Image (cartoon, helix red, strand yellow):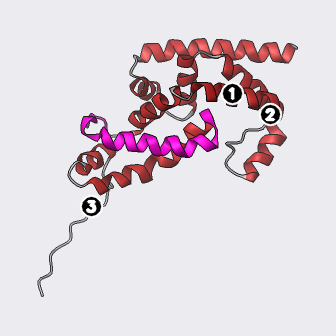
Amino acid sequence: MIVHPVTTTDAPADDAALIEASRHEPERFEEIYDRHAGEIQRYIARRLGPDVGDDLMAETFLRAFRQRDRYDSTFADARPWLYGIATNLIRHHRRSEIRFFKAIARTGVDPAAESSLEIVADRLSAQAMRKQLAAALARLNVGERDVLVLLASGLSYKDVARALNVTVGTVSSRMNRARKKMRSALEESNDG
C-alpha cells in the first residue's frame, strides 16, 4: 500500500487565492460562499426585506461565480467585490427598497430582524427611532444611501469605493451629505 503525504496549511487561503483556485476547481468557490453569504444576505435583507434577501444573495454569488475570471486577485478580501455585485442587484430593486423603508416608517417594525430576542430588544430600545431612521433613509438619494448602508455594514471607505467603483473622495462627500440629511430629517421629526 502506497501512502501519499497530505499537505495541509494552517492558515486558510485568502479570498483571492480561493477565487483563483476555483477557476480550475469550481467547487472551491463554495468556500467564498461559506465565508460571506450570511453577511451579504443580511445586507440585502436590510435594504430590501427578507423575502428578497435570499434570492438576491443567491444571485450575487451566481454572478460572482460567473465573473470570477475577472476578479482582481491583488485584493485578498472579496467582500467589497461581493458588496458591489449585491449593490448593483439592489439598484434593480430600488422601488421595492423605498417601499420597504416607508413600511418601516409607518409601522416601526423591521421584518429583517434576526431573532425574536433582537425584535424584543429593538422594540424596547428604539421603536420610535426606527420609524424616523427609515423615513430619513428613504429621503436619501441612491448614492448616499448606498454609501451609508455599506459603511454601516462594516466596510471601510476604501472598500466602499471599490464596491461602488467610485473614488474614496466620492464616498466621503456622499457620506457627509447623507449625515447632514439624516441629521436634518431626524431633527425635523423630533421637532414635529
**As shown in the figure, which amino acid type bears the numbered disc 3?**
Thr
Q: Residue at x 33, y 44 (%)?
A: 65
**As shown in the figure, which amino acid type bears the numbered disc 1?**
Arg
Quadrant in the picture for the C terminus = top right
Residue, disc 3 = 9
- Residue 40 at least partly seen: no
Residue, disc 1 = 99
Q: Residue at x 24, y 39 (%)?
A: 69
Count of numbered circles on the image: 3
Q: Is residue 45 left or right of residue 71?
A: right
* Main secondary-structure element of the magenta-colored stretch: helix
In depth, the one of 104 and 13 nearer the eye is 104
Tag 3, which secondary structure?
loop
**As shown in the figure, which amino acid type bears the numbered disc 2?**
Gly
Tag 2, which secondary structure?
loop
Going from the N terminus, do you reach mark 2 or mark 1 first?
Answer: 1
Tag 1, which secondary structure?
helix
Q: Is residue 31 magenta?
A: no
In depth, the one of 127 and 59 nearer the eye is 59
Query: In this view, which residue lies farthest toward the left?
Result: 2
Q: Is residue 92 left or right of residue 3?
A: right
**Magenta segment:** 47-75
The location of residue 75, given as percent across then percent down, is: 31, 35
Residue, disc 2 = 108
Quadrant of res 7? bottom left
